[in-house]
Image (tube, rainbow, N blue to C red):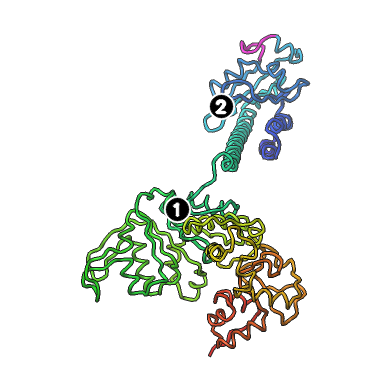
């Protein structure tokens, strides 16, 4: 029974049981059951205690009783307490002579006439006693000589069991903590999702609209405003970048300090340097007095650099130094000045392409592109057009002492117009229409495009005649991206027909579209040839921006000729 290889084989099989993916109680029961294959035993028991000393798990073998109901039938509480208290194995050769065992326990153990031997060892891990592992057997002369070997084997088994129990408890604790963290995260998400319903939306003077796209930008601006991070406002011309910059300043801790703005595209490089950094008296012709630059004026507050993408590479290097060091020198001066400015930049230029083409410094791009905010074009917020139109008309009335109002049909018409100039173009449209209105109620006939008085009207009517007034869903409201104005075609249009792209609704002169039309590839090539393959000139011929022409060339696969 106790061959030299039996303990080793027993430990191997027990290790396999302990590493099996089963519940801990089943695992411990399997360990107790397999012990009979390696040690002589009548009953085997394993008692695992909680930290408070109460029974947590009991596994038995060699009896017909439920594991947790009658475990004290075979191992008295006093025996478990003795082993746990001492942390040492306990061997009782004849339990009938031990005060730890009661007479009723021996009677219940089968009423054996021969003495019963008990062997118990502590189950421990990391110097903590977790329970006991014990066996009993009928004592005979041959079995008694193997007590030391059995104690050694049971001790090794108990150590393996202790490590397994500890691992299960660690995993259980981690799992519970994970559940709690997930619960807290879920509650946090629920609170975050519910927060807009509990709190009123962000309202900023000068920014009008209730569309989802606008609300998301406003919420982002409100969050960013609480920090000093540099913000890069991006979007098409006329989307209100200056208004949003002012909003961020007003919502920031710097709101009581100055808000200073500068259009970088409006000044040559020499003047731009003086405007931003200031100059000393006599620094150049006309510098009759010392002057503080915009950085100094905005010290402690916010500085908006509009059209940041238009500054020259040489000036980009000078600006980068100020942004990195927070220090500058006036033109013609030698004294270093330290400034604390929250920088907001704005551009409608594709800075990524400019970096790739070497037109914009990559290090400056990364310096200003800390928190980019993309402002939605007007076509992505069509529901805001009536609100904006009414607000612009109210402003016009206040300035000109008029009492004009839109007819419902007029508001419906203007809501279906396409405004490539976005909010700025919408305001101009309202002012032009209000100025020329013949009565106090603005009707659809008052719009200039309805009376063939603007270029957009002529283009749209020509496009409608070319296409018999049939519009495709391809150019439905808010579905045509401005990034590829020359790339789309109307279903059913002939190869040489001009295609209007600026429609927000059906292609019809009554739609009030004020944007430019999109032509096919042949017309694009014709415009490029007339312009000497200069995209900017071709854009002026087509009424598009150079960037839009570039997208159209790539979309049509037209190779630009170089001379």
Tell me where residue 311 appears, x and y as whole percent: 41, 72
Tell me where residue 32 appears, x and y as whole percent: 70, 29
Please identify the quarter of the rendering in which residue 27 is found.
top right
Q: Is residue 331 left or right of residue 265?
A: left
Q: In the image, which residues are magenta? A: 95-103
State which tag comes first along the sequence, 1 or 2. 2
Give the camera-side residue of 128 and 298. 298
Q: At x 65% / y 63%, what residue is drawn?
A: 444
Give the camera-side residue of 79 and 268. 268
Q: Which mark is residue 248?
A: 1
Q: Is residue 478 left or right of residue 62?
A: left
Q: Which mark is residue 556?
A: none
Tell me where residue 548 appears, x and y as whole percent: 58, 74
Q: Which mark is residue 129?
A: 2
Q: Is residue 529 magenta?
A: no
Tell me where residue 445 appears, x and y as whole percent: 64, 65
Dot 2 lies on which element?
strand
Vertical placement of residue 136 versus 513, above or below: above
Position of the N terminus by quadrant: top right
Give the camera-side residue of 173 and 163. 173
Q: Does any portion of residue 548 appear in the rendered image?
A: yes
Please identify the quarter of the rendering in which residue 76 is found.
top right
Assess whether mark 2 and mark 1 are in contact (beta carbons under 8 angstroms): no
For the residues carrying marks 1 and 2, which lies nearer the camera in this image? 1
Dot 1 lies on which element?
helix
Q: At x 52% / y 52%, what residue is drawn?
A: 218
Vertical placement of residue 94 versus 280, above or below: above
Please identify the quarter of the rendering in which residue 111 is found.
top right
């Amino acid at each position: 029974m106790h061959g030299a290889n039996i303990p080793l084989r027993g430990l191997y099989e027990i290790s396999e049981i302990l590493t099996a993916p089963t519940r801990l109680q089943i695992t411990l029961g399997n360990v107790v059951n397999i012990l009979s294959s390696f040690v002589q035993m009548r009953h085997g028991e394993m008692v695992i205690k909680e930290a408070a000393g109460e029974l947590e798990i009991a596994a038995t073998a060699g009896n017909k009783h439920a594991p947790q109901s009658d475990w004290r039938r075979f191992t008295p509480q006093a025996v478990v307490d003795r082993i746990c208290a001492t942390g040492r194995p306990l061997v009782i050769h004849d339990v009938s002579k031990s005060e730890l065992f009661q007479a009723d326990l021996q009677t219940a153990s089968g009423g054996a006439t021969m003495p019963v031997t008990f062997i118990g060892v502590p189950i421990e891990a990391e110097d903590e006693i977790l329970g006991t592992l014990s066996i009993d057997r009928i004592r005979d002369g041959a079995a008694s000589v193997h007590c030391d070997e059995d104690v050694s084997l049971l001790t090794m088994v108990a150590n393996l069991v202790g490590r397994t129990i500890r691992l299960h408890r660690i995993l259980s604790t981690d799992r519970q903590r994970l559940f709690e963290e997930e619960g807290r995260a879920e509650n946090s998400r629920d609170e975050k999702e519910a927060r807009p319903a509990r709190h009123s939306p962000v309202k900023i003077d000068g920014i009008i609209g209730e569309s989802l796209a606008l609300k998301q930008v406003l919420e982002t601006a409100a969050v960013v405003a609480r920090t000093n991070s540099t913000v890069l406002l991006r979007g098409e011309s006329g989307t209100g970048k200056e208004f949003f910059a002012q909003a961020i300043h007003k919502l920031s801790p710097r709101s009581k300090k100055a808000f200073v703005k500068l259009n970088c595209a409006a000044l040559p490089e020499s003047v731009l340097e003086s405007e931003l950094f200031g100059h000393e008296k006599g620094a150049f012709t006309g510098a009759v007095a010392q002057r503080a630059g915009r950085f100094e004026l905005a010290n402690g507050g916010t500085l908006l650099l509009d059209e940041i993408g238009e500054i020259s590479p040489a000036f980009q290097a000078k600006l980068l130094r100020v942004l990195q060091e927070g220090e500058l020198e006036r033109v013609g001066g030698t004294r270093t000045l330290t400034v604390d400015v929250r920088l907001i930049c704005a551009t409608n230029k594709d800075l990524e392409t400019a970096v790739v083409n070497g037109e914009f410094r990559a290090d400056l791009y990364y310096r200003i592109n800390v928190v980019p905010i993309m402002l939605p074009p007007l076509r992505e917020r069509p529901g805001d057009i009536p609100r904006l139109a009414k607000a612009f008309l109210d402003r016009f009335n206040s300035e000109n002492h008029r009492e004009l109002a839109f007819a419902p049909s007029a508001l419906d018409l203007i809501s279906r117009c396409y405004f490539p100039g976005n909010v700025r173009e919408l305001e101009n449209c309202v002012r032009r229409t209000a100025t020329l209105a013949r009565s106090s109620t603005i009707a659809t006939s008052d719009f200039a495009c309805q009376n063939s008085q603007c270029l957009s009207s002529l283009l749209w009517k020509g496009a409608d005649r070319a296409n018999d007034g049939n519009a495709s869903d391809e150019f439905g409201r808010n579905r045509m991206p401005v990034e590829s104005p020359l790339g789309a075609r109307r279903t059913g249009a002939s190869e040489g027909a001009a295609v209007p792209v600026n429609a927000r609704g059906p292609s019809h002169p009554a739609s009030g579209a004020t944007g430019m039309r999109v032509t096919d590839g042949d017309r694009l090539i014709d415009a490029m040839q007339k312009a000497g393959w200069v995209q900017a000139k071709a854009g002026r011929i087509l009424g598009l921006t150079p960037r839009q022409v570039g997208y159209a060339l790539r979309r049509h696969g037209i190779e630009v000729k170089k001379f």
